[in-house]
Structures are given as structure tokens and as C-alpha cells.
Image: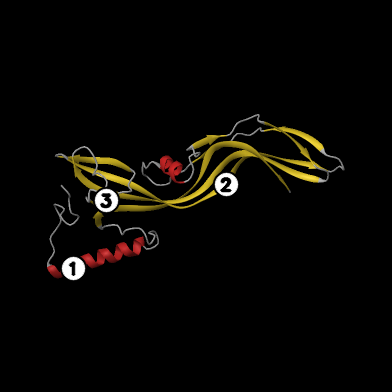
């Protein structure tokens, strides 16, 4: 049983004229509040539309009498830029006219974590590995004592940095709510109605399991 938004028990009935003015005021307020948050592709909160087939996770909110309330999440990827996440570094100076051999090791361990700043239980890790890189992990701690031997050319400053390959990711999370009979959410492409409940732009670094040294001159 799908519960329309305008059929909520306990709501005080208004006369036709007052009802029209009240609805106009609510719509105007919602438009002002969401105008700085929603992107043009996001549906306006409060509209009942067919549940998006691209929802990747449903969370049970509760229910009674065989009717369950659900919140579902879907993602939109905006950009994913490769980024080297530095944990430790060394500056190697060769002020002589001859090549110089250096051996260094990492002495600092850093932890890089995918951050989620909205209160949803959406499966961010699966979204990132599917749409950005299969090498992405939700958390990565760099190793200690990893050794590097290198030759610095004459009259050269070499920067040696240790860290993990990663990405700077920008994406959006949409939350949708609905009710459905039984213990399972509505199946994809069922035509069942959902209401958009929130839209949350996100930005995070996403580490991978690829850990290495990088060399550059300065």
C-alpha cells in the first residue's frame, strides 16, 4: 500500500481558499531552502515519483501492520581526480659535481579514510570501486620502514615522497523514502512511488591499496 503524502491522519482540514494559500506558501518556502543545495538534475523534495531504479541500498526505518517504511540511496559521480596521498617525505640534496647514492626509509605512518559527512548508511565503498577504481579501499594505513635506494644527479635536489595512490572524488547522495508491503523494499522498475528525502553533495579523498615511493626534482 502506497501512502500519498497528502493523506496523513490527524492533519487539520482547511477551506479551499486557505488550503491553496497554505500550499503555495509551503512550496515557496521549500524552493527557497533547496535552491542553494539541489543540482538541476535532482528532483524537488516533496514530489512523489517512481522510485529510481538506480537506488543501490535500502534501509528499513520501521513499520506496522505489514507495511514497512524504507529509505533508499543512490549516487551521482561528478568528478574523480587522481591524487597521490603523501605519508612521508625526504629532501635529498646533492651539491657536488658527482652522482650521490642515498638510501632512505619511511618513518611516518598515516591513515587515509573515505569520509561520509551525511547521516546515511549508503554503501559508498561499492559505489567508488564500481564507478572510480576497483583499487579503492575505505581505509589505508601506510607502512613503516619501507626502504628506497636512489642516485641523485650532480647539483640536484630530489624530493622522495612515500604514500598511496588515491583519488579526490566529488559525488552526490540522494535519499528516497517510501512504504511497501512486506519485509522487502520495492523491486527495481516496479513503478512504485518514492519521495525524495534529501540531497547531499560530498567530497572525499579515496585511498587505494597501491603504496609506493614517488621521486621528483625541485
Residue at 79 percent of width and 42 percent of height: 93
Side of 6 relative to 152 (left or right): left
Q: Name the residue tied to disc 1.
A: 20
Residue extending farthest bottom: 17
Counting residues from the start of the chain, the first of labels 2 and 3 encountered is 3
Distance between mark 2 and mark 1 Cα atoms = 53 Å
Label 2's element? strand
Give the spatial CA distance, label 2 vs label 3: 35 Å
Q: Nearer the viewer, residue 153 or 1?
A: 153
Q: Using the image, determine if residue 140 lies above or below residue 191.
A: above
* Mark 3 crowdedness (10 Å alpha carbons): few <14, some 14-19, many ≥20: many
Q: Looking at the picture, tell me which residue is in the foreground, 171 or 23.
A: 171
Say which residue appears at 17% left-offset and 50% top-offset.
3
Q: Mark on residue 83?
A: 2
Mark 2 crowdedness (10 Å alpha carbons): few <14, some 14-19, many ≥20: some
- Residue 20 at what x, y percent from top left? 18, 68
- Residue at disc 3, secondary structure: loop
Left or right of residue 33: residue 177: left
Q: Of the residues under marks 3 and 1, which one precedes in the sequence?
A: 1
Indicate the position of residue 1 as horizontal and vertical percent values: 15, 47
Which residue occupies the foreground of this view, 47 or 137? Answer: 137
User: Dot 1 lies on which element?
Assistant: helix
Percent coordinates x, y for residue 158 in the rendering: 74, 43
The answer for how far apart the CA atoms under marks 3 and 1 are is: 27 Å
> What label does residue 51 carry, if any?
3
Disc nearest the viewer among 2 and 1? 2
Left or right, 118 with reference to 17: right
Q: State the image coordinates of residue 77 (x, y, percent, origin top left).
A: 43, 51
Residue contact at pointers 3 and 1, CB within 8 angstroms: no
Q: Earlier in the sequence, mark 2 or mark 1?
A: 1
- Scheme of colours in the image: secondary structure
User: In front: mark 3 or mark 1?
Assistant: 3
Amino acid at each position: 500500500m502506497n501512502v500519498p503524502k497528502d493523506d496523513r491522519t490527524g492533519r487539520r482540514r482547511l477551506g479551499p481558499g486557505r488550503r491553496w494559500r497554505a500550499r503555495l506558501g509551503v512550496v515557496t518556502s521549500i524552493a527557497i531552502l533547496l535552491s542553494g543545495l539541489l543540482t538541476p538534475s535532482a528532483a524537488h523534495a516533496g514530489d512523489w515519483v517512481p522510485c529510481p531504479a538506480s537506488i543501490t541500498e535500502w534501509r528499513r526505518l520501521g513499520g506496522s501492520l505489514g507495511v514497512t517504511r524504507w529509505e533508499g540511496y543512490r549516487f551521482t559521480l561528478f568528478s574523480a581526480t587522481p591524487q597521490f596521498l603523501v605519508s612521508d617525505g625526504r629532501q635529498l640534496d646533492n651539491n657536488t659535481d658527482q652522482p650521490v647514492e642515498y638510501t632512505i626509509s619511511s618513518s611516518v605512518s598515516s591513515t587515509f579514510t573515505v569520509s561520509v559527512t551525511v547521516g546515511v548508511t549508503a554503501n559508498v565503498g561499492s559505489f567508488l570501486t564500481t564507478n572510480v577504481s576497483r583499487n579503492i579501499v575505505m581505509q589505508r594505513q601506510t607502512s613503516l620502514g619501507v626502504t628506497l635506494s636512489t642516485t641523485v644527479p650532480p647539483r640536484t635536489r630530489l624530493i622522495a615522497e612515500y604514500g598511496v595512490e588515491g583519488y579526490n572524488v566529488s559525488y552526490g547522495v540522494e535519499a528516497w523514502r517510501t512504504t511497501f508491503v512486506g519485509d522487502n523494499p520495492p523491486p527495481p522498475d516496479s513503478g512504485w512511488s518514492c519521495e525524495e528525502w534529501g540531497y547531499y553533495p560530498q567530497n572525499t579523498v579515496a585511498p587505494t591499496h597501491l603504496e609506493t615511493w614517488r621521486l621528483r626534482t625541485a
